[in-house]
Image: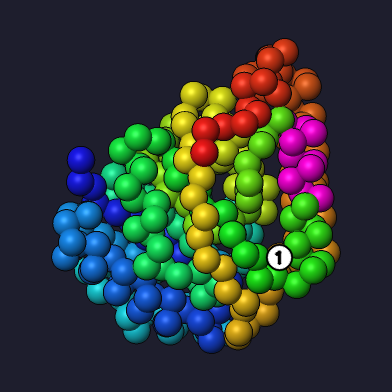
Amino acid sequence: MIHDLSFVLPAYNEAANVEESIRQGRTALERLVETGAITNWQIVVVDDGSSDGTGSLVQRLVDDRIHLVSHYLNRGYGAALRSGFDAAKGSLVFFTDADLQFDATEIDRLLPWINRYDMVCGYRSARQDPWVRRANAAAWGIALYGAFGLDVEDVNCAFKLFRKDVLNGLEIESSGAFVNAEILIKAIQKGCSIKQVPVSHFARLAGEQTGADPRVVLRAFRELARFYRLSKDTEGPWTSSDRTTSLANPMR
C-alpha cells in the first residue's frame, strides 16, 4: 500500500537550522514520490514560541506543501508535537527535530516497515550527544522501564513514523519531553506494534541544545511521576497486573 506522508518538524529557536531542515525534508520527500514510495506529502513546521525569528524564516517558505503552525508562547516539546499531529493530513505521520541531527533521507529506512507495523521508531546507532545528555538518556530509560515496563532502545529518538490512525486514537497530554514515552506506552497498551530501526545521528553544529537543560529534565520527570500516580490511582489500562509483561520487549 502506498501512502501520503506528513513530515512534522517542531522547532524552538532554530533560526540557524530550520531553513536547511525544511530543504532536506523537501528533497527527501520529493525523492520518495519519484520512486513511488509515497503519493503526496506536506511539511508542517511548528514554531513553539521562538524568540530568534524562526517563525519569520519559515513564513517566507510557506506554500501549498509547507505549512507553519505558530505558538505565541513556548509551550514545550509535547505541545509542539500535538499541534503538528493535529495539522497533519497524511495517512502517515513522521516527525524529526529541526536541529539537523538526523538525515531526512533515512525516512526510507522506516517506510518499508509501516505496512507491517503501526509505528516505526528510529534509534541512534552511534549517538553523537555530549556525555551528560547520554547519561540523562540512560537514566530516563531505566526510569521508564521501572515505572511502566517500557523496553524501547531509544525512547526519545526524534525519528519516528506512525500510521495516522494510531495518533488519532491517542489522547496526548504531555507538554514536555515525556511525550515520546506517553505515545509509546499508550499505543502499546492499545495493542499497536513497533518496529525499531537504527538511524544515523550527528552532532549539533548550530543553535542551542535544550535537552540537557535542568528545567527540561525536571519537567520530564515531573510528568513521569504524574503519569505513574495516575497508573496507580485509576482503573485505566496502566493499572493491569500484567502491565510490565505487556509492555516489555516490543517487536523490533
Give the extent of the magenta segment. Answer: 139-148
Q: Amino acid at mark 1?
A: Gly
User: Considering only vertical position in the picture, is 95 above or below 47?
Assistant: above
Residue toward you, 51 or 13:
13
Compared across the picture, whether 142 is left or right of 250 comes to right
Q: Position of residue 233 (x, y in %)?
A: 77, 20
- For residue 151, which quarter of the picture? top right
- For residue 45, which quarter of the picture? bottom left
Q: Quadrant of the N terminus?
A: top left
- For residue 214, say whether it is visible: yes
Q: Position of residue 138 (x, y in %)?
A: 77, 52
Disc 1 is placed on an element classified as loop
| Residue marked by disc 1 | 211
Compared across the picture, whether 226 is left or right of 249 comes to right
Q: Position of residue 244 (x, y in %)?
A: 70, 23
Name the dominant secondary structure of the magenta segment. Answer: helix
